[in-house]
Amino acid sequence: MNFPLYIAKRYIRSKSSNNAINFITIIAIVGIILGAASLFIVLSGFAGLRDFTLEFSSIIDPDLKVETTKGKSFILDENQEKQLLNIKGVANFSKIIEERVIASSDGNNHPAYIKGVDQNYNKITAIDSVIPYGNWLYPDTPQIVVGWGISNRLSVFINDYGKAVTLSVPKPGKGQISSQSQALNQVNTVNVGIYDINEELNNKYIFTSIQTARQLLNYEPNRVTNLEFKLTENADEDQVKEDIKSILGDTIIVKNKDQLNDAIYKMLNTENLAVYLIFTLVLIIALFNVIGSIVMMILDKKKTLNTLFNIGATVNDIRNIFFYQGVLMTFIGGFVGLIVGYIIIQLQSSFSLVMITPSLPYPVAIHFKNFVIVMITISVLGVIASKIAASRISRDLVKTS
């Protein structure tokens, strides 16, 4: 049996004759419990906020998106289409034409992005699930589906055939412009649906058929601005990327969902790191109590330490006793703190204790990696604190009776 560890366990279970030392020890353990619970709660809160933020935007995000690095659009021929569908791991893909436009109706104007999609788009994303009013597009028709923000700005609802929405883009070319028809390409459309994702996207996209987008932009039938892919369940994403590049050439770039939302990911990760560091500092302060508790215990057990030294225990053995005691205090406090934090997160998830709005509870998510992060942080800091406290033991201290 490990002699220092055995004695350390006895010291953990036993009470000191000095009530002040018992009180300091309890304060130290409670500090660790609260620190571990707080860190876990904050990490779970940020995990929930991250999932909530990306939940809705990912509805219209494909598994992979192909964009060109040369110009705005590229040609996709029939042979390439067949090759793309034959790639192992590709369930389907949709051809997209995307461009900035001005939408206007009854004197109301709004800058937006037109997104012309083909009939496969419903198989790539779950756009149907976020259309509370109206319906999705019928193919080969001058119909559009707009977000709540665009609907409000243009004062249009659904299936109002007496109120057309005009989409306009500048015509390419040079020379003097003498009329609006020379300056702009325009198509008249009818809104048939309203989607609701989030504030940013609700003001950004106007969905229409790819035929309408081609008409507006004067694109030939095989020209697209990007492709959006849905992968099979066990697809090798990296291999699929390589296969797509080998078919379409070096002038395209393939992005996954993380890369499509890289700005959001960077912001959330930066905030998560900042909060983690702040609460780690709180843990460090709490672990000063552990150092103080162990030092007080050393002074209280001075006579016992002298006895242990006289019966053959080395100074290093005696140091290890209090080192193990500090480590055990940290592990026990960290474990209990994780249990407390887990219970609080479960209560928030089940009973919505904290609300952002009257109808929206603060989102939380329990991820296994957060348990690991908290326990590793507690362990490392606890080992350092215990080592610092145990190092106060010297030969002169244990030899003094």
Image (cartoon, rainbow, N blue to C red):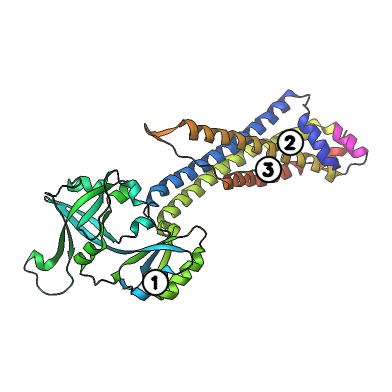
Residue 62 relative to residue 383: left or right: left
Between residue 90 and residue 292, name the one nearer to us: 90
**Left or right of 283 in this view: 132:** left
Left or right relative to 60: residue 312: right
Is 304 covered by the magenta stretch? yes
Q: In which quarter of the view is residue 176 placed?
A: bottom left
At x 26%, y 63%, the residue is: 210
Q: CA distance from mark 3 to mark 2?
A: 12 Å
Q: Which mark is residue 117?
A: none
Most common secondary structure along the magenta stretch: helix
Which residue is painted at 15% across and 47% down in the image? 160
Q: Residue at x 41, y 70 (%)?
A: 84
**Crowding at mark 1 (Cα within 10 Å: few <14, some 14-19, many 20+):** few
Sequence-first disc among 3 and 2: 2
Kind of residue sitting beneath label 2:
Ile
Magenta span: 303-313
- Give the residue at mark 2: 294
In terms of image quadrants, where is residue 77? bottom left
In the foreground, 167 or 380: 167
Tell me if residue 329 comes above or below residue 18 in the rendering.
below
Residue 306, magenta (yes or no): yes
Circle on res. 382: 3
Residue 186 picture location, percent across and down: 15, 62
Labelled pair 1, 2 in contact (Cβ < 8 Å): no
Q: Position of residue 75 (x, y in %)?
A: 31, 74
The residue lying toward the viewer, choosing from 316 and 400, is 316
Q: Quadrant of the N terminus?
A: top right
| Label 3 vs label 1, nearer the camera | 1
| Three-letter code, disc 1 | Lys
Q: Residues within 10 Å of mark 3 (few under 14, many from 20)?
A: many
Q: Secondary structure at mark 1?
A: helix
